[in-house]
Structure formats: structure tokens, C-alpha cells
Amino acid sequence: MNIKEIQQLIKFVSKSGVSEVKIELKDLKISVKTGSTPKVVHSEPLLVNPHPIPQASLDQDEESQNLSDYEITNKEDNLIIIKSPIIGTFYRKPSPDKPNFVELGGSISEGDILCVVEAMKLFNEIESEYSGKIVKILVENASPVEFDQPLFIVDPS
């Protein structure tokens, strides 16, 4: 986990209204506490898997190849990979009868809502930290996502 991911975690915790989040990986322990009263009390622990589970629609080799291609492209073309800050269910629309937040090839600005990730009946709006054009949408609507799983690829130019 790098400093940017830790900053995103702190930002998420402060926006979510929870008073404390603890993450324990085999070589890292993080505890983030806020001074606010929690809005939601969770009765069961939230487990974070640092290794995303492959989507059901792709086999593991195909997904690994796709992500490797994007990571190489990201380095060569200066593309940005937007990842999920939490575990949950990914939704491209605010509700079934509304249009998608973003479309493939569409332009986005910093602060635009890209999607929502539902976790424990809370719908968390995922905002863009970048301006640019959506090059690829990596997750199908209503699919489960893991923490740090790539969701979108954006061309900032």
C-alpha cells in the first residue's frame, strides 16, 4: 500500500462517517480514526482482500493479460487506472431507470461521479480525481468489486 492509497483511505473514512477503520495485511497494519460519531455501526468485521477476485466473465489468464496490457499502456501512453477504494457491488447508474454516470469515450472532469459502490447497504459515490476521457470500463454493472480493483482507464490528455 503506497502513500496515495493511504491518503485515499483516510479521505474515504472521513467522508463515510465511520469513526474507525483497521486494515491488517501480513506486512502492514493501518488504523484510521476520526473524531466524529459513527453514522453506521457494523456488527461484523469487514475483511479486505488485497488481491482482487477475477470477474466471472473472464478467466484468470485472460484478465491477467488484460490488466498487464493496461499497465504497460498506462506507462507508455500516460493513462490513469481508477481503482475501487472499497469492497462492494459496482453500479454504473444511480438507479435502474437512470442513465449511466459515464460512458466509454465520454469526457470526465475532476469531481465527476463515475459510479457507485454499494457496501453494506450504503451507496458510496466514486468521484474522479482526474479530468480526461474514459478509455475502458473494466467492470460490468452490478458486479462485485474488491478493494483496489481497477474500474476505469482514463486518458488525461
Image (cartoon, helix red, strand yellow):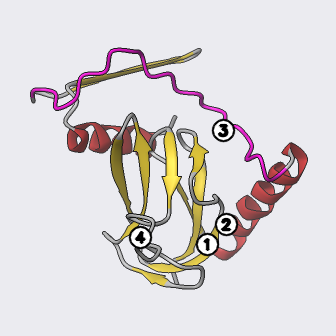
Label 4 and label 1: CA atoms lie apart by: 12 Å
Looking at the image, which residue is at 40% across and 74% down? Answer: 98
Label 2 and label 4: CA atoms lie apart by: 14 Å
User: Which disc, if any, is residue 52?
Assistant: 3
Q: Amino acid under label 4?
A: Tyr
Which residue position is annotated with label 4? 130
Q: Amino acid under label 3?
A: Pro
Is label 4 in a helix, a strand or a loop? loop
For the record, the magenta segment spans 37-58
Which circle's residue, 4 or 1, is located before the other in the chain? 1
Between marks 1 and 3 in the image, the one whose residue lies nearer the viewer: 3
Q: x, y (%) of residue 128?
A: 39, 66
The outermost residue toward the right is 61
Tell me the crowding category of disc 3: few under 14, some 14 to 19, or many 20 or more residues within 10 angstroms, Cα based: some
Whether the magenta-drawn stretch holds residue 40 is answered as yes
Q: How many marks?
A: 4
Which circle's residue, 4 or 3, is located before the other in the chain? 3
Is label 1 in a helix, a strand or a loop? loop
Which residue position is annotated with label 2? 74
Q: Are the residues at dot 4 and dot 1 in contact (C-beta closer than 8 Å)? A: no
Q: Are the residues at dot 1 and dot 2 in contact (C-beta closer than 8 Å)? A: yes
Which circle's residue, 2 or 4, is located before the other in the chain? 2
Q: Amino acid under label 2?
A: Asn
Looking at the image, which residue is at 25% across and 40% down? Answer: 16
Q: Are the residues at dot 4 and dot 3 in contact (C-beta closer than 8 Å)? A: no
Which residue position is annotated with label 1? 78
Magenta segment, principal secondary structure? Answer: loop
Between marks 4 and 3 in the image, the one whose residue lies nearer the viewer: 3
Q: x, y (%) of residue 122?
A: 33, 42
Q: Amino acid under label 1?
A: Asn
Which circle's residue, 1 or 3, is located before the other in the chain? 3
Label 1 and label 3: CA atoms lie apart by: 23 Å
